[in-house]
Image (tube, grey):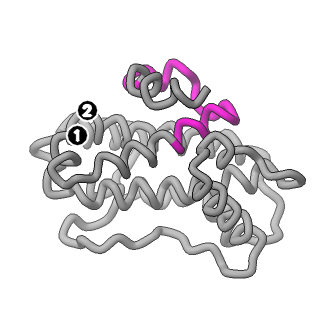
Amino acid sequence: MSFLFGSRSSKTFKPKKNIPEGSHQYELLKHAEATLGSGNLRMAVMLPDGEDLNEWVAVNTVDFFNQINMLYGTITDFCTEESCPLMSHIFYWSFGHPAFCSAWILKLSCFSVTFIGVPFRKNFMSVAKTILKRLFRVYAHIYHQHFDSVIQLQEEAHLNTSFKHFIFFVQEFNLIDRKELAPLQELIEKLTSKDR
């Protein structure tokens, strides 16, 4: 999956897209961070009053991409084409071409962050849903293939919190079909059951 997250030799996390300080998207990101600090993840995903749903989805999707990029970056030594050939195949199939993969995921941020003030494209929500579905597959791969490594690195609390936040977000706005979530449905039920 190095084609998705960059070179395996680089151990430093680098966010894929910075939101310009002072922009409306930056203020939305700060709002999301503030509500996350409240400890109520269900509240943190709710659309703030008066805000545009497309902008909220865009800002959060870029943030989820950065979180997953960071999480995946900690296990790159354990996730190789040799140890995870099926995952490499799935990503190749899903994105069409390895070199195209990262740019395709970041297409979402180009819709909102690069072209501030430009209206969202008509297919924006469809693209966002596809990106979020594919980011879910990275979570599923980490849980199914690398959770022992996550535990060894003492990162399970961070992974679980990130995933729970992601699930609450996609559920709040119906961004991923329930059938797509089936590989982790038991975990989803366990993580979200006490927050209903």
Question: Element type at marker 1?
Answer: helix
Mark 2 lies on residue? 144
- Say which residue appears at 79% left-offset and 46% top-offset: 122
Position of 15 with respect to 42 (left or right) is left
Q: From the image, which quarter does the C terminus lie in?
A: top right
Of marks 2 and 1, the one in the foreground: 1
Query: How far separated are the C-alphas under marks 2 and 1?
Result: 7 Å
Q: In this view, does 16 lie to the left or right of 171?
A: left
Q: Quadrant of residue 113?
A: bottom right
Q: Look at the numbered discs 2 and 1 and tell me whether their residues touch, using CB distance below 8 Å.
A: yes
Badge 2 local density, few (<14 within 10 Å), some, or many (20+)? Answer: few
> Which residue type does callout 1 highlight?
Phe
Which range is magenta?
Answer: 165-184
- The verdict on residue 177 being magenta is yes
Residue at the image position 62 percent from the left and 45 percent from the top:
128
Q: In this view, does 15 lie above or below 182?
A: below
Percent x, y of residue 46: 72, 44
- Extreme left residue here? 82
The residue sitting at the right extreme is: 50
According to the picture, the residue beneath numbered tag 1 turns out to be 147
Left or right, 58 with reference to 14: right
Q: Nearer the viewer, residue 92 or 57?
A: 57
Residue 14 or 169: which is nearer the viewer?
Answer: 169
